[in-house]
Image: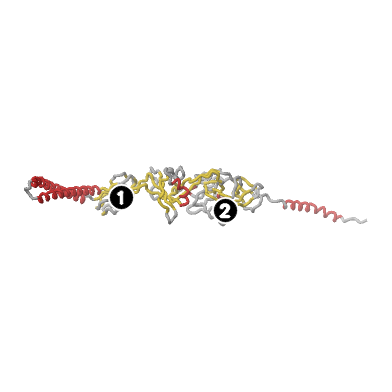
Amino acid sequence: MTHAHPVVRIVPILLLPVWLQACKESKASSAPPPPPSVAVITVAPERVALTSEWIATLDGYVNAQIRPQVSGYLLRRNYQEGAAVRKGQVLFEIDRRPFESALAQTKAHLAEAKAQLGKTERDLQRDRPLAEQRAIAQSQYDNDVQANLAAQGAVESATAAVDTAQLNVAFTNVTSLIDGVAAIATAQIGDLVGPATLLTTVSQVDPIKAYFPLSEQQYLQMAGRINGHAKASMSGGGALTLVLADGSVYPRTGTFLAADREIDNKTGTIRISATFPNPDRMLRPGQYGRVRADTSVRTAALLVPQRAVTELQGSFQLRVVGADNTVSTKTVKVGDRVGGRWIIEEGLQSGARVVVEGAPTRDGALVTATPFSPPAGTRCPCPAFSSAVPSSPSSSPSSPCSQGWCRCRRCQSRSSRKSFRPRSPCRRPTTVPTR
């Protein structure tokens, strides 16, 4: 009978724990990783007002150039530069002594003409009965009549000369033609000025005009409202908003005034004018701003965050999570932009779940969809819209940020939809979420 060696029985017993641990590690390594998490929004139809914006230049409602009507030496300036003046207020005084002398001379000529007229009238009265009795030649009487008519003309001419001289004396006081704000004088005391000399300019600034160009396509869309019989605003009854150069919104709204008669063949735009109340004279001619107006209303628009849209070789794409939690890429047609969101014209259905944030995944990959919410306290990179993002999404056009990203057009780049590309003078903050 043969017996097994005791060492042979001990070796399998010692190796049993190692085999069990190896089996456990094999089972653990074969478990699939969890699906990646993505933040999505559910698209639903919304009623939004489409806002258009144009670069505007401010100008006075009336700009009156103040020029003297007579030539002479400037003696004094009677207004404060940059201050408000009234119609008829004397702004400048010209040396009036030469014109007073001319006035006295014309008055003397008038007196001489009147004296001559009196002589011809007496001659005519004396010779008329003699001519009727044929006591004098008829030619002498005819000469008396013509001399009287010439004397009457001389009196009228001298009277007109006196009136002209009086006007010239009055013109030595250069007055304002309108109520408004007077500019800094361009002529100095002691200058020899004349009708070709610009002394200053007075601008009526309440209300003040805003000029901005409208493209031919936009004009055709709004031609009915612009050319209507009633003076309606471009926004179909709403008011125009003026955004100033520092990004602040002017507190008073404006109205449409007029459209130019022609479209500029060089730029393809038509000039539009609007008026804004300016009682405190805060706005001045020459300022730049942006005129904003609600040009139309969409009642069932599908909007998605701009950060969810990717542009690739002229086409726009979205990532959509289906009912089976798989990702697919859809090519869409984008329309107008409302704040930080885009209107999707084609390629997207209501109720679709659009990926806003998350790691890139291939089509058909399984993901875990979570509702998207913008981080509170995020700041817009543009100093013009530096207020914090609200904790809940906002789609109001007046809100500085919507869905957690900047709506400032200077900060948004149409060539890249994945990350901010702030432009000068904007500065990139550390709290702006990346796309």
Q: Mark 2 or mark 1: which comes first in sequence? A: 1
Q: Nearer the viewer, residue 44 or 117?
A: 117
* Coloring applied to the structure: secondary structure
Tag 2 secondary structure: strand
Q: Position of residue 309 (x, y in %)?
A: 57, 51
Q: Nearer the viewer, residue 405 or 152?
A: 152
Tag 1 secondary structure: strand
* Residue type (three-letter) at the residue carrying disc 2: Phe
In this rendering, the label closer to the viewer, 2 or 1: 2
Return the mark for residue 316: 2
Return the mark for residue 66: 1
Quadrant for residue 264, please give it: bottom left
Any part of residue 104 in sight: no
In screen coordinates, is 102 left or right of 84? left
Q: How many dots with numbers?
A: 2
Mark 2 near mark 1, Cβ–Cβ under 8 Å? no
Tag 1: Cα neighbours inside 10 Å, few (<14), some, or many (≥20)? Answer: many
In screen coordinates, is 216 left or right of 197? right
In screen coordinates, is 329 left or right of 190? right
Q: Nearer the viewer, residue 299 or 250?
A: 299
Quadrant for residue 312, please give it: bottom right
Q: Position of residue 203 (x, y in %)?
A: 35, 47
